[in-house]
Image (spheres, rainbow, N blue to C red):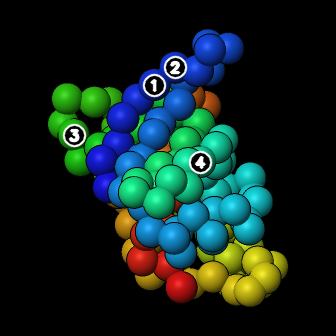
């Protein structure tokens, strides 16, 4: 879906994702983990569903890895990112009820906050 940056009335910066599936919304409403993107809110309008997430200041891992204009990620941060995403997968496969299979784990679907903490996103193909 289309993704937009916005600011709430309290000054919180968020990302709004339009055109999401009912299944993606259902999964994100059920799961809570420190290493999965935080759902701030949603609209379940019959015409168009939208999800609202916390804004991740460093953006997608793919951009940080492949954009030559940005400084390289330190090996310490790379290791931390790998461990955090593996914890997200462990949560989905072991603790989420019912269990969730992501089906699209890639650097595109790993988001980084301002402190290099990683969160898994992109649940559009999950089952």
51 vs 77, nearest the viewer: 51
Do the CB atoms of the residues marked 2 and 1 lie less than 8 Å apart?
yes
Describe the element under mark 2 as helix, strand or loop. strand
Q: Of marks 1 and 3, which one's residue comes earlier in the chain? A: 1
Q: Which residue is mark 4?
A: 42
Q: Of marks 1 and 4, which one's residue comes earlier in the chain? A: 1
Whether residue 47 is visible, yes or no, is yes
Residue in view at x 73 percent, y 73 percent: 91
Q: Which x, y percent locates residue 108?
A: 35, 57
Mark 1 vs mark 4, foreground winner is: 4
On screen, residue 85 above or below 53: below
Q: To which quarter of the image does residue 67 belong? A: top left
How many numbered badges does the structure rendering display? 4
Q: Which x, y percent locates residue 55?
A: 52, 33
Q: Of marks 3 and 2, which one's residue comes earlier in the chain? A: 2
Mark 3 vs mark 4, foreground winner is: 4
7 vs 73, nearest the viewer: 7
Do the CB atoms of the residues marked 1 and 4 lie less than 8 Å apart?
no
Label 3 to label 2, Cα distance in Å? 27 Å
Quadrant of the rendering where the N terminus is positioned:
bottom left
* Residue 7: image tag: 2
Q: Which residue is mark 1?
A: 6
Label 1 to label 3, Cα distance in Å? 24 Å
Describe the element under mark 3 as helix, strand or loop. loop
Describe the element under mark 1 as helix, strand or loop. strand
Q: Which x, y percent locates residue 68?
A: 18, 36
Residue in view at x 55 percent, y 55 percent: 44
């Amino acid at each position: 879906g289309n993704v937009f940056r916005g600011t709430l009335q309290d000054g919180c910066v968020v990302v709004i994702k339009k055109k999401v599936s009912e299944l993606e919304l259902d999964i994100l409403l059920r799961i809570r983990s420190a290493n999965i993107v935080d759902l701030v809110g949603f609209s379940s309008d019959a015409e168009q569903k939208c999800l609202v997430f916390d804004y991740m200041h460093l953006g997608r891992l793919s951009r940080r890895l492949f954009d030559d204009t940005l400084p390289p990620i330190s090996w310490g941060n790379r290791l931390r990112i790998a461990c955090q995403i593996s914890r997200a997968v462990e949560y989905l496969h072991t603790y989420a009820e019912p269990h969730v299979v992501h089906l699209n784990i890639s650097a595109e679907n790993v988001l980084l906050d301002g402190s290099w903490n990683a969160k898994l996103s992109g649940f559009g193909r999950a089952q």
